[in-house]
Image: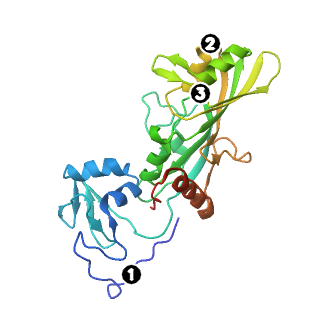
Amino acid sequence: MVPVVRRSPAQRKAPAPAGTTTDQSQKLQKVLAQAGLGSRREMEELIKSGKVLVNGGPATLGMRVNPDDLVKVGRRHLRFSLSSRLPRVIIYHKPEGEIVSRSDPEGRASVYDRLPAIRSGKWLAIGRLDFNTCGLLIFTTSGELANRLTHPRFEVEREYAVRILGDLTDVQHKQMLAGIELTDGMARFDVLHDEGGQGRNRWYRVVVREGRNRLVRRMFEHFGYTVSRLMRVRFGIVNLPPRLKRGQYLELTEAQTRSVLDWLASDGGVTEPQP
């Protein structure tokens, strides 16, 4: 747990009027997104709806706030720090048999059961994996970062190791790279490599740039192949560490988090998010 340093009354400065610009101020919608409440665009809509108050008054789009301002979202008082700290990012090795949801009517195990507790905000999943898929899951406290990595228009690469029963023909291999028609539109692999296998089992490495539900499985099923194992091994520039066992997580260091943010900035011109 990160220690919190509290200032004495004599050290506290009088709060600046809401909406004024100080050295520490930031736009309200950015602060809300960084607190893990959603994407910046979603926070803009939330502000427009009148559900956000600053120092007791209704917030306006573009308003700037500082650490002494009192921000309330619905019934929730938001505590935040406008500092240079980076967002928290953790890597989780999801095993089969867990859902990527905080609640389940069937009572199945959730990936959130294994994540470390945080005092404010919440862990946001960057992409999803279905119940029978294992491998890399990324979580962050930054709604802006989560949105930047998963929004379809950015086309961030996802790499998977796939084991099927059978062996693709050359024609099928070419069709998967060129594109095939699924029930929800065209789909294609950017990369499709034969990794070998034993007996009837064959391993392939595939790369896609979208996160449609069960996309990799459905593409192989389109040609009648059963996927017996599916594992995500990379998301963007983040790889699943070989030493990370199933059901375990690790938090990125400041340098590693900075690398991800620098990559996003150079690849898509995104403004660097902060918690």
- Residue 147, image x and y in percent? 44, 46
| x and y, in percent, of residue 132 in the image | 59, 27
What's the residue at 30%, 83% (across, down)? 13
Amino acid at circle 1: Arg
The label number, if any, that marks residue 223 in the structure image: 2
Instruction: Give the labeled residue for mark 1.
Output: 7
Judged from this view, the residue extending furthest toward the right is: 198
Q: Quadrant of residue 76?
A: bottom left
**Which of the 4 image quarters holds residue 133?**
top right
- Helix, strand or loop at mark 3: loop
Direction left: furthest residue:
57
Q: Earlier in the sequence, mark 2 or mark 1?
A: 1
Q: Quadrant of the C terminus?
A: bottom left
| Figure coloring | rainbow
* 31 vs 67: above or below: above
The mark nearer the N terminus, 2 or 3, is: 3
Q: Residue at x 30, y 73 (%)?
A: 68
